[in-house]
């Protein structure tokens, strides 16, 4: 009985040993699976471009409401001839040099800045020209008139004296008259706008006078050139008048009569004419 038990125990031990050897041999010959290295994610390069949201006119300024930023793939950008980031200028002195349709791409070469060739053509209406005009500050309200506004030019003239001389003292108001010189004149720049893209070579900006750059028709050059050397000129925002605003001293001073001193023969002739 004991020998039979010993036999079974020994037989079981031998089987267990054989199974262990076979299992070890099989595991030793199994191929080791390759180690998978993490694959780095590839980020595609994109290029910034700009597209018009609405139709844009030549001479207009750009702002970020009129164009949209678009991220293009390298391939898409190259198809447009773009190889780097598109950078536009959004300052008030940079203008578009062509009409751009809604949805069209906008590039730096579509803009012209102050000082560049063709800039003055963009800020001047076709057929018009720029003129620097000196006006009186006495009735000019600060910041009331801005570039882009339309103004009326009021002239005060005298048949006796040159009113452009600020030191002149009037003893006789005979022949003094106020009238409109020009209406609906567009203001391009003011002398106190230090960042303006357009400035007169000689600027007056003091308590008495200011220089404004205006847009006029070529036939008015002679009129303005003579006027600013002989008349006292003031600028006001344009208005529609029921009748042209004109006035003489007699209109504002009751019973005013210009008195002229009579001398010598002239005095005698005038007296004879009275009787």
Image (spheres, helix red, strand yellow):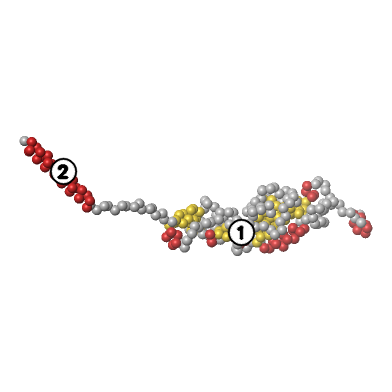
Q: Could you say which is closer to the camera, residue 133 or residue 262? A: 133
Residue 6, compared with residue 207, is above or below; it is above
Vertical order, 140 against 228 (above or below): above
Quadrant of residue 109 within the rendered picture: bottom right
Q: Residues within 10 Å of mark 1 (few under 14, many from 20)?
A: some
SS for tag 2?
helix
**Numbered tag placed on residue 114 in the rendering:** 1
Give how far across and how far down residue 92 sits, in percent.
Answer: 59, 54
Q: CA distance from mark 2 to mark 1?
A: 96 Å
Residue 216 picture location, percent across and down: 66, 59
Which label is found at residue 200?
A: none
Residue drawn at point x = 63 percent, y = 57 percent: 197
Of the two numbered discs 2 and 1 in the rendering, the one whose residue sits closer to the viewer = 2
User: Residue at the spot x=10%, y=38% of the render?
Assistant: 6
Residue 61 occupies quadrant: bottom right
* Pointer 2 residue: 16
């Amino acid at each position: 009985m004991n020998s039979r038990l010993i036999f079974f125990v020994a037989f079981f031990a031998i089987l267990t040993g054989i199974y262990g050897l076979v299992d070890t041999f099989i595991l030793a010959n199994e191929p080791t699976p390759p180690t998978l290295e993490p694959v780095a994610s590839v980020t595609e390069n994109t290029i910034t471009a700009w597209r018009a949201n609405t139709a844009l006119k030549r001479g207009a300024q750009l702002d970020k409401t009129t164009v949209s930023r678009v991220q293009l793939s390298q391939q898409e950008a190259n198809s447009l001839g773009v190889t780097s980031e598109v950078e536009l200028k959004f300052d008030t002195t940079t203008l578009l040099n062509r009409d751009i349709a809604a949805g069209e791409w906008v590039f730096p070469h579509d803009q012209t800045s102050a000082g560049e060739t063709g800039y003055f053509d963009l800020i001047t209406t076709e057929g018009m020209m720029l003129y620097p005009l000196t006006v009186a500050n006495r009735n000019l309200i600060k910041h009331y008139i801005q570039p882009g506004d339309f103004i009326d030019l009021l002239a005060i003239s005298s048949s006796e004296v040159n009113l452009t001389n600020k030191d002149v003292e009037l003893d006789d108001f005979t022949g003094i008259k106020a009238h409109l010189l020009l209406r609906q004149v567009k203001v391009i720049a003011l002398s106190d706008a230090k960042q303006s893209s357009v400035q007169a070579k000689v600027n007056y900006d003091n308590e008495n006078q200011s220089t404004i750059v205006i847009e006029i028709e070529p036939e008015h050059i002679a009129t303005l050139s003579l006027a600013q050397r002989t008349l006292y000129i003031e600028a006001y925002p344009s208005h529609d008048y029921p009748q042209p605003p004109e006035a003489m001293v007699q209109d504002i001073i009751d019973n005013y009569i210009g008195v002229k001193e009579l001398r010598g023969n002239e005095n005698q002739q005038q007296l004879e004419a009275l009787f």
